[in-house]
Amino acid sequence: MLKEREGYIPFAGYQTYYRVAGECQLGRLPLLVLHGGPGAAHYYLQSLDGIAEKYGRAVIYYDQISCGRSKTPPMPERWGCSLFLDELACVRAFLAATFGWDCLHILGQSWGGMLAMMYAIGKPWHEHGHEGLASMVVASSPASMDLWLHEAIRLRHYLPREMDEALAQADVDGDYGRPEVRAATAEYYRRHVSKVPEDERPANLHSPEPDPVGDECYHFMQGMSEFVVTGALSHWSVVDQLPTIDVPTLVTSGAADECTPLVAKQVADGIPGARWELFPDGTHWVHGEQPERYNALVERFLEEHE
């Protein structure tokens, strides 16, 4: 049976929830996982438990502040890249002090990959340093929100015309509850975000309860839908800073991913020496759709860099 440990880390006057799956066999470094959103939680990434089960490597998850089990009231005055980078540094310091894990790998999915890239870049995003970061996996993440938005709208145009128009109209009038908008959103998600709807996944791979503050965090950071970026991440970009990253990097994405090949290639081309794996038939949730292949690929990469 997989050993599990969980607890809370004091941060910013609140508590950041963490969970550790498995243990590290001799010579293996732990893998710290950064979830997406912003505003999601760690549950949808727990297919990575397979790395702990099969390969003897501890996998660490945490719910970013205001998300999942890291409960806070809404705090738009504090949400932003710097807060989440400070939290990542705090989590790393806790892992080093508590478990002796001062050296580790990081895997960031979607927004988590954006966070990982900023962390690996350092200044001007933060001044914590990234010593002990053995490698980085950037999973279905953009380096430019402008390109991400351009590609999302392009994918939306491939929907039936009435669905495309319904989604565009919702971003104008703000009525996302209309049946035609909900149907169009579900179809876009099925094609590009996840072939398996969240409520049809195994219980351990979806949130056990609604998370209104996490939703509010997403709206503050991104916007009201996949097709507008009106929040704090509007025009966010690390494209010009990617060449400064000195961490061995694996980029992963799915062929049907809303992180399109153009988006993923921009990341892979920009980071010196980065490798890119494009998974056929995969969406944004490719790690959960093809878990054995995905976990094996990630494990091979991690083993090369420890």
Image (spheres, grey):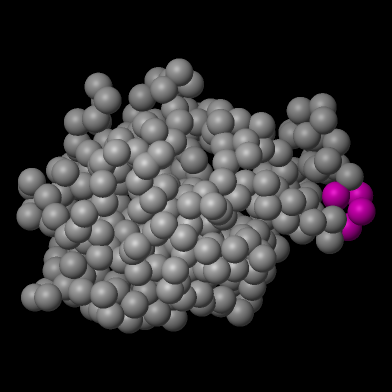
Instruction: Using residue 209 as the reference point, say whether residue 223 is left or right of it.
Output: right
Residue drawn at x 63%, y 39% is 235
Location of the C terminus (image quadrant):
bottom left
- Which of the 4 image quadrants contains residue 175? top right
Residue 202 in the image: state x and y as whole percent.
44, 61
Looking at the figure, which quarter contains the N terminus? bottom left
Q: What's the residue at 54%, 52% (across, down)?
A: 240
Q: Where is residue 204 in the image (x, y as percent from the top left)?
A: 38, 56
Q: Is residue 200 magenta?
A: no
Q: Does the magenta stretch include residue 163?
A: yes
User: Is 126 positioned to the left or the right of 15 in the image?
Assistant: right
Q: Say left or right for 30 vs 280.
A: left
Q: Which residue is drawn at 12% across and 50% down?
A: 96
Left or right position of 106 against 237: left
Residue 59: x and y, percent? 25, 62
**Whether residue 73 is situated above or below residue 283 in the rendered picture:** above
Q: Is residue 229 above or below residue 190?
A: above
Chain part drawn in magenta: 160-164
Q: Is residue 246 in sight in this rendering? A: yes
The image shows residue 208, relative to residue 135, as above or below, that is above
In depth, the one of 41 and 95 nearer the eye is 95
